[in-house]
Image (spheres, rainbow, N blue to C red):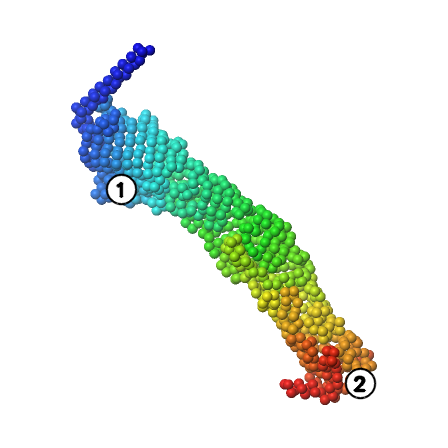
Amino acid sequence: MKNSRKYLFLVLKILAVLIIVLIVGVFAYVSINKKTIISQVTREIETKLNGKLSVGKVELSFLRNFPSISVLLNNVTLTDTMFSQHKHTFFKGKEIFVSLAVSKLIKKEPPLKGLRIDDGEIYLYTDTSGYTNTYLMRGKKDSVKSVAKNSNIELKKIVLNNVRIIINDLKREKLHDFVVKNIKIDVDDNDNATSFNSKAEILIKSLAFNTRRGSFLKEKVFSGNFEMQMDKLRKQLVFNKIPVKISGQPFNITGFFDFSGISPQFSLNIISNKIAYPFVRTLVPEKISNSLAIVGLSKPLNVTASIKGPLKGGEPLVYITWMTENTQLITPFLDFEKATFKGFFSNEVVPGFPRKDPNSKIEINNFTATWHDLPITSKKIEILNLTEPELSCDMSSAFDLIKLNELVGSNSLKLREGTGEIRLNYKGPIVKNDKTNSFLNGEVSFKNGNILYATRDVEMKNVNGMIVFRNSDVFVENLSTSVKGQNITMQGQAKNLLTLINTQPDKANIDWNIYSPSLDLGAFTYLLDSKKKINKSSRSKGMNAATAKIDELLEQGRLHVNVKADRLHYKNFDASNTVADITLLSDRYLINNVSMEHAGGRMNLNGSLVNVVGNAHNARLLVNMDNVDVSRVFKAFDNFGQDGITGQNLDGKLTSKINAAMTIDSKGKVLPSSITSIIDFSLKNGVLNNYEPLKKLQRFVFKNRDFENIRFAELKNRLEVKDREIKINRMEIQSTVLSMFVEGVYSQKGGTDMSIQVPLNNLKKRAADFNPENIGADKKGGRSIYIRGRPGADGNVAFKLDLFNKFDKEKEKVN
């Protein structure tokens, strides 16, 4: 064992001595032949280069590239013939080390085996006319034979340290600018191919295929250990799935550079997983990056990119695909959570058209996400023309209505039950503005919904129907619901609503159609209550701007309603075939026209209802009645707030025009003292039944005549009502009992003062079939007796003889 160790140490000593002797021998040989070696190397370089070469100091270096022996060239420059004009030096290097093979030196063969450049620059320049200094790369024509003769020249290693490489093609507007911080290339050459094993760190300052479009990978550091092959026959530099890093992000790159033909091409396929979206944007030109900036992602993407195009300039074809899962997606319109989707970017939508923003698009497929806990799906989202981006997309969602409460955050509407479904399509600009909704189409459907309109404290039950959006217009189709036991079906539309809701909600006009087979107005007296005020402080906490706009619309918008009811009733009032045209404003209701069949005739009215203070409303009505049953009218209208004559006492067909003003409380009750009206009426086929005031006249005249059932000729007059008093203008009454003229004031406040003129011609006996006929209210009536009605001691009207017609004299005195 000891002998073995002794022999091993002896062998090692001998080898060490031999190596030292070899190094010393080589060094001695190189030192002795220094001038010859330098002359051989510089002559070899000069014969290959077709340009003006300038070399500073040349020396032999043994230690700096140990164990290789190198010729060191200092301050080397190479310029073309047009350098004086364009001022771009083709090559300059502070230090160039040319590694030598000693065995080839000894054999007098080309000794170059390696090249190292420190602190240099290569500038390939082409001007706008097409002149280029790249001809220097082709070498001298007279050196071709020499190259063929010395085909065994091999470079085994190339090293670049801090070398800048610029390809500036002004004609094709191409600029590639790289700073090679460090690259080491081991070369393995054979007859068919040359293999390159590289270790590189390169700063990419510009990779612009079109300088107007910007640069890819700008200011990014490219690094990695990889292999490439140069296929000599095809003149292609090929690499397959080489792992590299760009500014620390791992990538896998496959591709080739095809240098053959008159139009050399390149192709790159790049794969990277878990790459941050903001980082993706930094890899592409600024214009593309700005287009991609319209969205934001919280989680990384898996990305595949294909870039291919001409090497001599021109825009490459760019196709980028991506996939991500459960990310937050931020857009100019909505922000989504748990978004999962695939997509791609292409700068050539129409083949053959320029590869620029107008011909580019972004497409997202199979999109799923949640928006405020609502599930959202979309088959396709597309962004076209990235110069002026236009978005087209479809989106759908099915949900429980109650989930919308937190989303909508409205204090006016509360969703309690039911399900809903949204299907939307948008095609328009991607920049949000006041007209964004003009490009929205879609529909929202409701099923078995329960909605509380909190502003009115009204609940809509069993809501079913659909709301349709067409551009900025909104249509409601067959929306059925039950409101306070009233089954109604509604349809409506609002032109330009989705634009006005963002700009001028008080200018929004909604046309609404309501149908009900039977409608009880008593269920809608809530419309007379004051709207509940929205709590502004709670709004600011829980509502977004869009929700506030919805409430403003409901509070301030103009609602034009057309109502159709087969039957309409309110307390004692009953009508059929009702058609109403009403406008609801924030502080008033405008009754444009209401038409109905009532009491055997027709009735029309219009007017307004204005909220004054609290729950009080001032109403103005213009009512026209045509051939209606007077007894039913008096009953329906609660005897018009007076008890002087009621529907129990009257029969006949009434035609009238009523111009009235009054105050109505929140229960729909008229305040009698507020009524002011002018009533022009005509009563035909009139009958007065058991009317107590006339029966009292029987104490004075015609005690044997029937005062319980009195038939009239046409009874017509103008009545003026104010503050619970009725002014009766001189009115002719021709009846089966007697003829008379009545005028004065009937007051429910105790101020009644009426005069009844009974012409003496009434003394003539009237047959049972007597047909009364009018002579005219302006007639004096001949010799008459006068009866005056005033309040008696019991507060009721008492009639007495007015022998000297003092009523008329007092009236003249007042006038």
**Residue sitting at 78 percent across and 79 percent down?**
695
Q: Can residue 235 be seen in this view?
A: no
Quarter location, residue 636 = bottom right
**Residue sitting at 48 percent across and 44 percent down?**
328
Amino acid carrying mark 2 in the image = Lys
**Residue sitting at 31 percent across and 31 percent down?**
184
Image x and y of residue 365, in percent: 50, 42
**Residue sitting at 69 percent across and 63 percent down?**
569
From the viewer's perspective, tell me whether residue 71 is left or right of residue 287.
left
Neighbour tally class for label 2: few under 14, some 14-19, many 20 plus, Cα within 10 Å: few
Q: Which quadrant would the C terminus be assigned to in this image?
A: bottom right
Please tell me which residue lies in front, 244 or 767.
244
Q: Is residue 458 above or below residue 4?
A: below
Question: Would you say the residues marked 2 and 1 are in contact, meaning their CB atoms lie under 8 Å apart?
Answer: no
From the viewer's perspective, tell me whether residue 225 is left or right of residue 579.
left
The circle on residue 764 is 2
Q: In this view, does 225 lie above or below 583?
A: above
In what element is the residue under mark 1? loop
